Image (cartoon, rainbow, N blue to C red):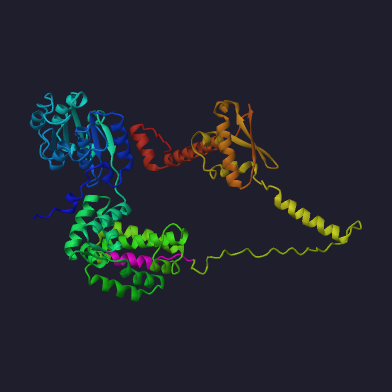
Amino acid sequence: MSYQVLARKWRPHHFQDMVGQEHILRMLMNALEQQRIHHAYLFTGTRGVGKTTLARILAKCLNCDSGVTPSPCGSCHACQAIDAGQFLDLYEVDAASRTKVEDTRELLENVLYPPTQGRYKIYLIDEVHMLSNHSFNALLKTLEEPPEHVKFLLATTDPKRLPATILSRCLQFHLKRITPEQITKHLQHICNLENIRHETPALEKLATAADGSMRDALSLLDQAIAYGHDIVSKNEVNSMLGSMAQDDLVPLLHALASQNGNKLFALIHHLAECAPDFQQVLEELISMFHKIAIAQIVPDAVSADEPIIALTQCFTPEDVQLYYQIALLGRRDLSYTPSPQQGFEMTMLRMLAFKPSMSIHDCTPTLAPPVDTTPVILPIAEPEQSVPQAITTAAVVEEKTAAAIQPTLTMGLSEWRDILHKLELSGMTYALAANCTLKQIIGNKIELSLSANHQPMLNQKLKERIAEALCRHLKQPIQLEIHITSTELSTPVKQQQSEQKQRLTSAKQSIMQDPKVKALIEMYDATVEISLL
């Protein structure tokens, strides 16, 4: 008897057999129960998540002899023929091998004819994004208004390559990646039914390596069964995948925690003798740092292993976050290094070199030194009136306190231009402030003057921005008032224009005194034009 691979043997035949995709299954089952059947369905998602399988199950639901139902019987002629790939009214097309427009036209020639065996004629086009633009144009009109007996089921891993005209005519369903937990549970179920001895950590490793694809997970399980002689063990799976087990990396992390560089490099060289994939080693390290961080911050979120719990006492949360980020960057840059081992060693050296200054014993917050509350008795030089010493001391302390609380706005009238450059203003806000002058300061209130010629620039929003900038610069709350005046003001803008004019005049005089310039003027009757860039 020929062997049938697990990916084909355990292909789902009913909606209930599908792993994950509960949201899509619910929509399809409800639509079938309510007889709300669309003429074109588009299933998208990564490889191995069940797009084609879902389309075949839907074809059975539409053509089952018991009627349109979300639960096909599986025993009638239509169901068995579809499972065997022998149903005459199910046209499965691989668009990757039939991309020409002639193939599409030949396929659509039989659309008008009624089905020969079933209730509906089903066109299942896999990898539909591989069709040419001419093929899409040929399919467009039929896809929009097909006959009542025709249903289109399209599947693709790259929906972005489909024309918008095709997408708008289909009912789209996106199949999500299957989580490692769901894959692990399904692999355990299959191993139990197949009488395959297995270890749960080995299946978890296979589920992680499958990267969300159930088909890839079943193919890897096939390889692991063959590799381990019908035994799926953790060590055999790590050897097959070329990855390192968590237990092999625990000594590495202990050496890192103790800042023992010699021991760390000895362990790295020992790992290198096994010829591992250093990218997978970094991925395993990243996963371990993730588990350590969860065990430290949210210990009840997951059930951590004993090695992970022990490592939580060796690293501070700051260490873990830093090492996690360094490992991520090291994995990203591994392809740029001369050799993967060198890149891995440099990543570990970064972890040794860059360490937060706060150690695990310095996590207690440092308290500020206590404030001396002893009353201060100041000497009094023969007061004119007899005042009790206690009252005088209290008055001095109160005066000092009041002086500390009182806002100290010592900005002079001539300092407005210098402070203006420190306020970090821009645009219209800076233009408004530069056309103002400082009128006076009363307490924490600053009054500015603005010429009536520039009054259209003034609005509440710009005024609030200037006030916020002054508060940031002076580090205390202030009140800002801008008064309109008709008098001529010496604003920072006018001062700057005056200085530029003086520089131009001085430069022109200096150039005019140059003998060569004088000679050119006399010889060619030239003029000197100077502009400030």
Front-most of 155 and 434? 155
Residue drawn where x is 17% and y is 29% of the image:
119
Q: Quadrant of residue 243 in the image?
A: bottom left
Quick check: 415 left or right of 22? right
Residue 339 visible in this rendered orientation of the protein: no
The percent coordinates of residue 231 (x first, y second) are 21, 65
Picture coordinates of residue 97, whole percent (x, y): 10, 40
Percent across and percent down for residue 480 are 63, 37
Does the magenta run of residues contain 344? yes
Residue 3 falls left or right of residue 394: left
Q: Quadrant of the C terminus?
A: top left
Considering depth in this image, is 387 or 221 the residue closer to the camera? 221
Q: Which residues are magenta?
A: 343-357
Name which quarter of the figure residue 116 lies in. Answer: top left
- 428, 233: nearer the viewer: 233
**Figure quadrant of the N terminus:** bottom left
Look at the image and tell me whether residue 105 can be seen.
Answer: yes
- Asked if residue 5 lies in the magenta stretch, the reply is no
Q: Is residue 465 above or below residue 292?
A: above
